[in-house]
Amino acid sequence: MTRSGTRDHRDHRDHLDDTSRAIIRELQEDGRRPYASIGKAVGLSEAAVRQRVQKLVDSGVMQIVAVTDPTQVGFARQAMIAISVSGDVEQVADELSTIGDVDYVVVTAGSFDLLAEVVVEDDEHLLGLVNGRIRSIPGVTRTETFLYLKLVKQTYDWGAHSSAPRAMESQ
C-alpha cells in the first residue's frame, strides 16, 4: 500500500498472462458477463474464471464497479483542480483523498504538484469545496480549476492488452 491507501500495482503488469488479460478484456466490454460465457471465450471452465477473477480483485489488479454518468444522477459540475503545494506533496495528497467529493488525486510533475478531479452538484458546491476545503489544507499555495464542458471520451480498457503500444496491435 502507498501512503494514500492505494496499492502500488507497478509489478502486476508483468505477471498477467494472456488468459488473465483476456478475462479483463471480457469484463471491460461487459462487467455483468457470466463467468460461463467468459470461460468459453478464453478457454477455461466457469470455476476457473471465477477463481481468476477473485484473484485479480483480491490482488488489487482490478475492481468490478458500476460506472455512472454524473449528470444523470444529480451532479451537474465536474472539474479538475490543479494544486500547487509547499512542503510535503504526499501529505497534501493524502488529505485531499479524505474529501468525499474528490474522486481522483494524482501527484504530477510540471507546473502543478497535484491534480484532483471532483464531481459536485453545482457551482456553489464547487466554490465551497475549493475555497472552504481544498485551499484550507496546510501546504496548498495555489489552485486552478478547469471546468468540464463536455466529456468526449472516457475509457477503462488499460491493462487488458499486451505491453505493446495499442497502435502496434493492429499491425
Image (tube, rainbow, N blue to C red):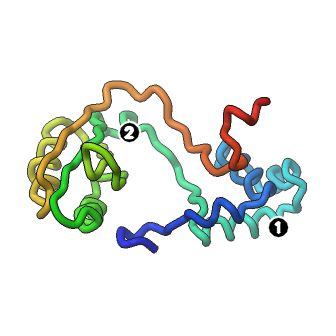
Q: Report crowding for label 1: few under 14, some 14 to 19, many 20 or more residues within 10 A (C-alpha).
A: few
Q: Amino acid at mark 2?
A: Pro
Image coordinates of residue 100 in percent, x first then y, are 28, 58
Mark 2 lies on residue:
70
Q: Within the image, what quadrant is residue 93 found in?
A: bottom left
Q: Report which quarter residue 136 is drawn in.
A: bottom left
**Residue 150 vertical position relative to residue 78 in the rendered view, above or below:** above
Identify the residue shown where x is 75% and y is 69%: 51
Q: Which SS class for mark 2? A: helix
Image quadrant in which the C terminus is located: top right
Residue depicted at x 67% and y 37% = 166
Q: Measuring 88% from the left and 59% from the top, which residue is drawn there?
A: 44
Question: Is the Cβ of the residue at disc 1 closer than 8 Å to that at disc 2?
Answer: no
Residue 30 x/y as whole percent: 67, 44
Tell me where residue 61 appears, x and y as whole percent: 60, 62
Q: Left of 69 or right of it: where is 144?
A: left
Under mark 1, the amino acid is Ala
The one nearer the camera, 88 or 73, is 88
Image: 20 above or below 161 = below
Q: Mark 1 highlights which residue?
A: 47
- Position of residue 86 relative to residue 123, above or below, is below
Q: Residue lying at the far front in this picture: please name it.
A: 110
Provide residue 71's location: percent of width, then percent of height. Answer: 36, 34
> Relative to the observer, which residue lies in front, 84 or 157?
84
Q: Is residue 77 above or below residue 102?
A: above
| Mark 1 and mark 2: Cα distance apart in space | 35 Å
